[in-house]
Amino acid sequence: MKKRLFYFGMLMIAALSLTVMYSCDKEPDELLLDSMVATGDIDLNAATAPANVPTEAVITATFNTDLDAATVTTSTVTLTQDYDNADIPLDLSVAGNIVTITPQVILGNGALYQLQMTSGITTPEGLALTALTRSFTTVGTFVPTGVIAHWSFEETADDVVGDFDPASNQVVAITYTDSRNADAGKAATFDGDASIIEVPNGDDLINTDDFTLSFWVKTNSEGHTGGHFVMGLGAFYGIQYEIFGGYDGSKFAISYEVPGQEGNVSEDMWFPALATDNTTGGWQGWDFAKSLTADEMIALLKDSWLHVTYTYNSTEKAGTLYFNGEKMKSFDFDLWPEEDQKRNVTGLKYMGSEPDVVNELAFGFVHSRAGTMWDSEPWGGYDFPDANHFKGQLDDVRIFHKALTATEIQLMYDSEK
């Protein structure tokens, strides 16, 4: 009897084993993504999208069963940079249930990407994948393409992108101190008395139809009277940016080109507290103005880091000012009166001439020391210690010969703040 029970038990175990083996070999009834990782074992399949993916990442996707390799193509697997919907060219390889995705180019820093897989991906038996999307952000700070010059002020005043470097005697009383955060490194610090950086051939930077200037600035009000000439290229004969002495506003003064006309057309991007547009009593060309109270403006401009961006789009004839990634004010030359010469503006143009001003971009003052304009004015002469010298910090000054989009500006600010 015991033997019979033993044999019966063995038969049952064998049957169960066959059942388990059969179950293990059984094809799944749906195609699923088991895991997705990027270089450095970064999980792209987690509930929270990672923000530290290397710019040279390789992505490995593992599924619950083997795939039909012929269905894994650049039509069914796409990688897109989010801000401009640019498709990234990919190399794809399939080994059983594993897909390896290798971008053919280095990804941009601090940029959001969308990886999509469509239902066109199937198994050899015809099971289709439920379409999926995974997001991730690359390491570093986002910088749009097309930078002409970039002064990062990492213990140097040299242009780290182009050739717009000052000579050693054109960097005066500058120190490099901690910037807005650890990732930003150092910033150039100006003493409000003699500090200045002068960059030769500054006219090459602004003689362009489309233009963007972007920078971080922090004023230091301690012991400082008057306004701050943060930077200038021949003052209003090129481009200048100043912060008012009461910190209740700031402005750009910029020279624009009108073909066939001698001299310059200067236009201020004036942004005071309680700014107005053409619907609230402002000039008809001002098509947008964010009305900040004096206290709100002071909070932005006094002793606080601020990201400032100015763009000019020659096709739309539009200038736009952004603070901390947000649109603050804009104008449209096409809204000027019919007879106004500004309706014929093409782009920015340096119109300065010696001895008044020279074609050197100055950080820390309204124009370089070589110019004689306003030399006798206590607020405008470089040799007057109480003139509107800039006191504070300046960092990551970038110039583009294109008009950045609002999305690009917001992304740049978000990644650098």
Image (tube, rainbow, N blue to C red):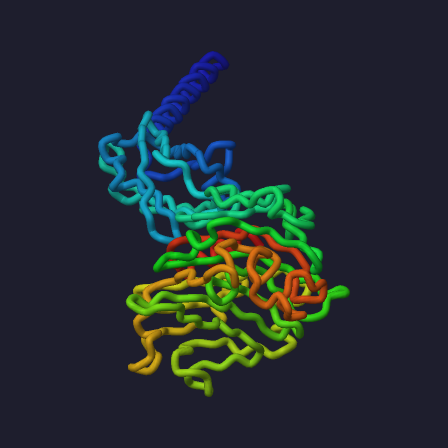
Left or right, residue 201 beside residue 26: right
Residue 77 visible, this angle: yes
Q: Is residue 255 above or below residue 200?
A: below
Image point (42%, 60%), residue name: 350
- Picture quadrant where residue 307 is located: bottom right
Please state, as top left, top right, bottom left or bottom right, where the C terminus lies in the image: bottom right
The answer to whether residue 28 is left or right of residue 324 is left
Residue in the image at 61% along x and 55% along y: 394
- In the rendered image, residue 321, in percent from the top left (x then y), is placed at 47, 67
Residue 285 % position (x, y): 39, 79
Q: Nearer the viewer, residue 206 or 168?
A: 168
Q: Where residue 222 sits: x, y (%)?
A: 75, 64
Residue most extreme to the top:
3
| Vertical position of residue 82 compared to residue 28: above or below | below
Q: Which residue is at the far front?
A: 355
Q: Is 195 displayed left or right of 319 in the figure?
A: right
Please name the residue shown 52% across and 55% down the image. Answer: 361
Q: Position of residue 48 (x, y in %)?
A: 51, 48
Q: Is the residue 194 above or below the residue 29 in the image?
A: below
Q: Nearer the viewer, residue 44 or 217?
A: 217
> Total of numbered circles in the picture?
0
Q: Residue furthest right?
A: 223
Q: Is residue 316 visible?
A: no
Residue nearer the viewer, 206 or 49: 206
Q: Nearer the viewer, residue 240 or 287?
A: 240
Q: Residue 259: which quarter of the image?
A: bottom left
